[in-house]
């Protein structure tokens, strides 16, 4: 009986980069945010809306807690039969397409799932040229004509 030796498939592309951009907060951002926060608290105290006061304080604490460290790096490894995103194996059949968004100083790759309810995969492309990403992903998936989502744009503009 002949034993089958598993073939080792070499990755087509492999990189590690943050999933999203880190926003630099200037002094003006902190001053503006503080003024808005104090104004909302003053309004809630003046109207005696105690629950609103608690909600504002909780939101400020939650924002400070979630944004205290830099975004972690994710790994994307592309193979002929799919890709591995941060340890999760995904076949090309599970995906609906891809698109890239240009930010200030970075480009993000978004790979959408075939099921609309499933979350998309998002990672910055790092030092890889966009043409290389298009060549590799374009061989397996269609490039989608997408733009930045409204709440993502608001979050980026407000540097949240």
Image (cartoon, rainbow, N blue to C red):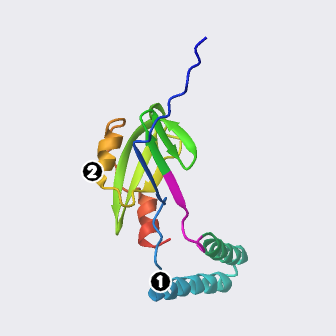
Please provide the residue range marked out in magenta: 67-75
Q: Is residue 155 above or below residue 80?
A: below
* Residue at position x 58%, y 14% in the image: 2
Q: Secondary structure at mark 2?
A: helix
Image height check: is 24 above or below 96?
Answer: below
Image coordinates of residue 58 in percent, x first then y, are 68, 73
The verdict on residue 121 being magenta is no
Q: CA distance from mark 1 to mark 2?
A: 35 Å
Residue, disc 1: 29
Residue 80, how many percent across, how many down?
A: 41, 34
In the rendered image, residue 152, in percent from the top left (x then y), is placed at 44, 61
- Pick the front one: 125 or 100: 125
Q: Quadrant of the N terminus?
A: top right
User: Which residue is farthest left?
Assistant: 131
Residue that label 2 marks: 131
Category of crowding for the residue at label 1, using alpha-carbon neighbours closer than 10 angstroms: few (below 14), some (14–19), many (at least 20) = few
Looking at this view, is 114 or 117 the one in front?
Answer: 114
**Which secondary structure is most common in the magenta stretch?**
loop
């Amino acid at each position: 009986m002949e034993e089958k030796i598993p073939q080792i498939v070499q990755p087509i592309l492999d990189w590690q980069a943050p999933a999203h951009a880190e926003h630099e907060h200037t002094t003006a951002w902190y001053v503006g945010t503080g003024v808005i926060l104090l104004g909302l608290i003053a309004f809630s105290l003046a109207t005696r809306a105690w629950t609103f006061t608690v909600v504002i304080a909780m939101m400020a604490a939650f924002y400070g807690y979630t944004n205290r460290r830099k975004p972690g790096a994710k790994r994307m490894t592309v193979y002929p039969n799919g890709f591995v995103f941060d340890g999760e194996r995904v076949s090309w059949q599970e995906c609906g397409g891809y698109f890239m968004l240009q930010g200030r100083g970075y480009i993000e790759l978004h790979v959408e799932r075939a099921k609309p309810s499933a979350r998309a995969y998002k990672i910055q492309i790092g030092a890889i040229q966009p043409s290389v990403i298009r060549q590799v992903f374009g061989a397996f998936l269609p490039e989608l004509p997408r733009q930045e989502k409204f709440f993502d744009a608001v979050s980026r503009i407000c540097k949240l």
